[in-house]
Image (cartoon, rainbow, N blue to C red):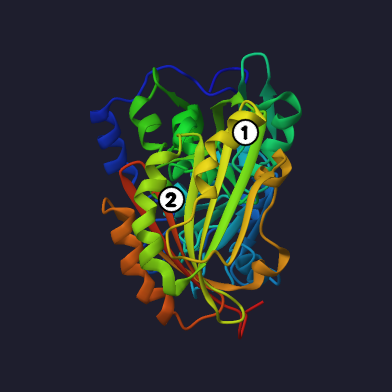
Amino acid sequence: MDSRGSPSLDAPIGRRELLRLLAGTSSALLTGCALTSTGRARRGTGIPDWTGLQQSVQGRVVPLGAADYESSRRGMLWNGLKPERFPDAIVHVGAESDVGEAIRFARQHNLKVAVRGGGHHWHNPALRQGGLLLNLSGLNRLEVDAQNRTAIVQPGVTGTMLMASLAPLGLAFPVGHEGRVGLSGFLLNGGLGWNYRVWGPSCASVDAVDLVDARGDSIRADRSHNEDLFWAARGAGPGFFGVVTRFHLKLYQLPQAILSSSLQYGIEDIDKVAAWMPRLVRSVPANVEWGCRGVVNRDNSRTLNIGATVFANSLADARSALGAFEAAPIGVTVRAKSLYEQRSPEDMFGPRSNGALRVLRCRGESVWSNASPEEVLSREGGAILAAPSRPAQTVFCGLGILWCVFRSIVNTHSVSR
C-alpha cells in the first residue's frame, strides 16, 4: 500500500509469480473451497488468540463456543437449509483494514479462510468446517461518478442499493434479478443480470478490483496491473484466491422505457408451446430478455409461464419489440396473459422476494445445453409433472446459442429458523 493507504499498482504479478505464490500460500487461504476436516494446516500453532484478533480489528470476532456463535453462524446463510459445518471463528468485518488483519492472523495460526459476501448462494460454499470465515456484508459503501459513468462498490452492496443510487441519475448497471443479492458473489461468479443480452455478463463491466491477497497485502488488479488476478476475479466465484474489498464498475444509461409481457399455458400443452418457441426466439431483438418457467403452483396445478421484459429508449420501440408475444401457438388456449405492462426502475431493480422466502429450505441445480428450445422444453415436461414439492419450478433462460435450465425445490415444512 502507498502512504495514503491506497492499493499499490506497482510490481504486477505475472503468471509464473502467481503460480509460485499460490503454491507457497495455499495453506493460508482458500476462499470457500476444499478445506481440510478441521480447516487447519497439519502443523498447528496452538489455540488462536481470538481476543488479540478482536483488538486488532474494528469489526466483531465470534469464536466457536461464544454465546452468540450459533446465531451468528446460521445468519451467514439465506437458505433455510443449514449445513453442519462450523468455522473456528467468524469475523464480521467492520472496515477494509480488517481483512488484511484477519488474513495475517490466519497465516500465523495456519487457518484456512473462507469468505461470505451477501450469503444468498444456494449451496452454501462460504460455510466451511474449521478455519476463519470473513463476513463482508458490513462493507456496503458505494461511490458514483455520474459524469464518467463509473462506480466503486464494496462487497456488501446489493443490487437494490446500487440501483437506488444510479436510477435518479439516469444510470444503470446489470445487477442480479433478485435485488437483495450482494454484488460480490454475483460479480465473482460472472453475473447474468438484467438486460444481459445487450450489456453482457455483469463481470464484463468490472474495470478493476481492489483485493487483499494471501499475504494480507492490499493490491489492485485491472487490465494493466496483476492481469491474472483481474482475469480470475471475473468468474472464479468462491474459489477466487483473494478477498475483494472494492469493485470498480462501468455504468450504462438507464433505459427510458421498460415493459413486460407474460403468458401462461397448461403444462399439458408444453409440446405445442415448445414447437412455437423457436419462431418466437428468432423474432425478438436483443433488448428483450425472456424466459420460461415450468411451475408447480401452490394449488398443485402445473403451468408453463412465459415472461419477457424489454429495455428500450421509447415506449413505441418497447411495444414493437414485444409484439411477438401477442401471438399464440395454434390450437393452444392461453390461461392468462398480460401485455405491455409498464415497469419502473424500482419494479425491476428493487428487492423482489418476499420476507417469507428467507425461511424456506431450498435446493437447486442447473444444466447448460445448446439444444433447441423445443427439445429442452419437451424433455422437461415430464419432470414438471412429476415434481413432488410445492412450490417448485424449472426455469429456462435463453442465452444466445445456449440454454440454462434451473430446477429448484422449495420445502416449506420443518423449516429451521
Q: Nearer the viewer, residue 81 or 32?
A: 81
Question: What residue sits right under mark 1 in the picture?
Answer: 153
What kind of residue is marked 1? Val
- Label 2: state its secondary structure: helix
Front-lying residue, 341 or 127: 341
Which residue is outermost to the front?
A: 331
Image x and y of residue 375, in percent: 28, 60
The C terminus - image quarter: bottom right
Instruction: Name the side, left or right, on which 306 lies relative to 167.
Output: left
Question: Which circle marks residue 238 in the picture?
Answer: 2
Task: Count residues near mark 1 (Cα–Cα under 10 Å), then give few for <14, some for 14-19, many for 20+.
Answer: many
Instruction: Give the structural element (helix, strand or loop) at label 1.
Output: strand
Q: Tell me, yes or no, if residue 22 can be seen here.
A: yes
Q: Is residue 226 above or below residue 243?
A: above
Q: Label 1 to label 2, Cα distance in Å?
A: 18 Å
Q: What amino acid is at disc 2?
A: Pro
Q: Tell which of 338 and 77 is nearer to you.
A: 338
Position of residue 332 measured from the top left corner of the image (x, y, whole percent): 46, 65
Q: On residue 381, which mark appears?
A: none
Residue at screen point 66% across, 59% down:
353
